[in-house]
Image: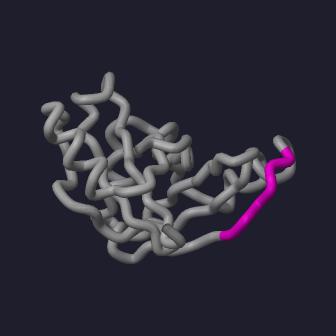
Amino acid sequence: MIEKINHIAIAVRSLEEHIPFYRDVLNLEFRCTEVVEDQKVRLAVFRVGETQIELLEPTAADSPILAFIEKRGEGMHHISYQVDDIEKQIAELKAKQVRMIDQSPRSGAHGSRIAFLHPQSSAKVLSELTQEVDR
């Protein structure tokens, strides 16, 4: 079951360039930075109520985030929906003929388990399912 929006991810070329806007101009609560090696990304996390904003910076020339920025420019990358049982949610979506990028969960930031839906299934918006580790 989808419980809430977990985070909104924004692709940027430089965290250092964009952190001050979210922290100092918008006065969002800065939580942390983290590198997710297998996704070739470094992120900065901000809290807005129960939702997070994640800035995504590529860490390698073959990073999917760098490819996104080069094709579309900086901006919103994906929206993540928090789920209570990611395997069950993937199965339900597949049964409804939703096209999935990830057929099974993989590791995400903060030790979470994630799976992406293909943008063609969700009005051209890249969507992610996130199951937090404490579940």
Residue 124, position as x, y percentages in the image: 31, 27
**At 22% from the left edge and 29% from the top edge, which residue is drawn?**
120
In the image, taking residue 21 as reference, residue 27 lies left or right, namely: right
The boundaries of the magenta stretch are: 27-32
Give the colour scheme shown: one colour
Give whichever of 108, 12 is nearer the camera.
108
| Residue 30 magenta | yes
Residue 69, position as x, y percentages in the image: 40, 45
| Residue 29 magenta | yes
Residue 86, position as x, y percentages in the image: 34, 56
In the image, taking residue 55 as reference, residue 123 lies left or right, namely: left
Q: Is residue 20 above or below residue 16?
A: above
Give whichever of 119, 98 is nearer the camera.
98
**At 21% from the left edge and 60% from the top edge, which residue is drawn?**
104
Quadrant in which the N terminus appears: top left
Q: Is residue 109 above or below residue 23?
A: below
Residue that protrudes farthest toward the top in the picture: 123
